[in-house]
């Protein structure tokens, strides 16, 4: 009996499938199954990696080639140190201390903050978003388009990914509520600002992925930005 080899999934089809999976995941995380976010993140990350391999790609396309891990770790250590220093400066300066106030985390205990920093952020946020946007999606687009196109495509979708989580931003962060107000218009403006800021952050993450040739660099910056926000927010109550 002759064994047949399955044809690789066309790159454009793989990109469309990844986008569809991310749309469903975003709805699940923010509307349908919020309490399952950790399991969803791990499962979806594995599915996305599977799509990359089904399209004929490999770990290098995702930014996790064994040969680049050393460079990625060095970038990661440097970026974590820079973010820690930046947060420390922001915590010391009176006019930036209020930015750490967040109603979503103001009642968290020390154990809950540790859980966010060590489990929820790295697995529920960083793993999924970096595998999705700077790993699989960026890697797939890069196979058929230049770096700039891959960066913009990934980053725009990364910004749109944050529409639902940012709907109540003016209520959650008092500093933004004071700036934009608590009207519908203020909420819309704050949401648009959040999406644009996140898209710009996505461009930076893509640059780090390209410059370091490793997904570990944007992963580290992403984790440090979120995790130190919890830590300093807790310490500055």
Image: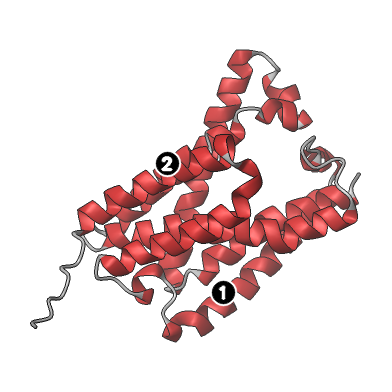
Observer able to see residue 207: no
Q: Position of residue 62 (x, y in %)?
A: 39, 68
What residue is at 41 percent from the left and 79 percent from the top?
A: 65
Mark 1 nearby-residue class (10 Å; few <14, some 14–19, many ≥20) = many
The colouring scheme, among rainbow, by chain, secondary structure or one colour, is secondary structure
Q: Nearer the viewer, mark 2 or mark 1?
A: 2
Quadrant in which the C terminus is drawn? top right
Dot 1: what SS?
helix
10 Å crowding of disc 2: few (<14), some (14-19), many (20+): some
The reply to whether residue 212 is visible in this rendering is yes
Query: In the picture, residue 48 is in which quadrant?
Result: bottom left
Name the residue beneath numbered marker 1: 75
Residue name at image x 36 percent, y 58 percent: 138
Mark found first going from the N terminus, 2 or 1: 2
Q: Is residue 92 above or below residue 107?
A: below
Where residue 195 appears, as percent x and y from the top left, is 51, 36
The tag on residue 23 is: 2
């Amino acid at each position: 009996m002759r064994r047949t080899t399955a044809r690789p999934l066309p790159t454009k089809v793989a990109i469309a499938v990844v986008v569809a999976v991310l749309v469903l995941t975003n709805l699940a995380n923010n509307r349908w199954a919020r309490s399952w976010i950790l399991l969803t993140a791990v499962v979806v990350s594995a599915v996305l990696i599977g799509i990359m391999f089904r399209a004929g790609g490999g770990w290098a396309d995702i930014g996790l080639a064994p040969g680049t891990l050393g460079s990625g770790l060095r970038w990661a250590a440097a970026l974590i140190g820079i973010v820690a220093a930046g947060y420390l400066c922001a915590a010391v300066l009176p006019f930036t201390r209020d930015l750490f106030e967040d109603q979503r985390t103001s009642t968290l205990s020390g154990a809950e903050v540790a859980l966010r920093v060590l489990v929820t952020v790295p697995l529920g946020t960083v793993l999924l978003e970096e595998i999705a946007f700077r790993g699989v999606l960026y890697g797939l687009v890069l196979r058929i388009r230049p770096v700039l196109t891959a960066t913009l495509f990934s980053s725009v979708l990364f910004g749109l990914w944050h529409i639902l989580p940012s709907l109540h931003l003016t209520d959650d962060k008092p500093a933004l509520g004071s700036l934009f107000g608590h009207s519908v218009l203020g909420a819309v403006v704050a949401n648009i600002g959040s999406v644009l800021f996140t898209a710009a952050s996505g461009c930076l993450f893509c640059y780090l992925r390209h410059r370091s040739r490793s997904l570990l660099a944007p992963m580290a910056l992403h984790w440090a930005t979120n995790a130190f926000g919890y830590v300093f927010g807790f310490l500055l109550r």
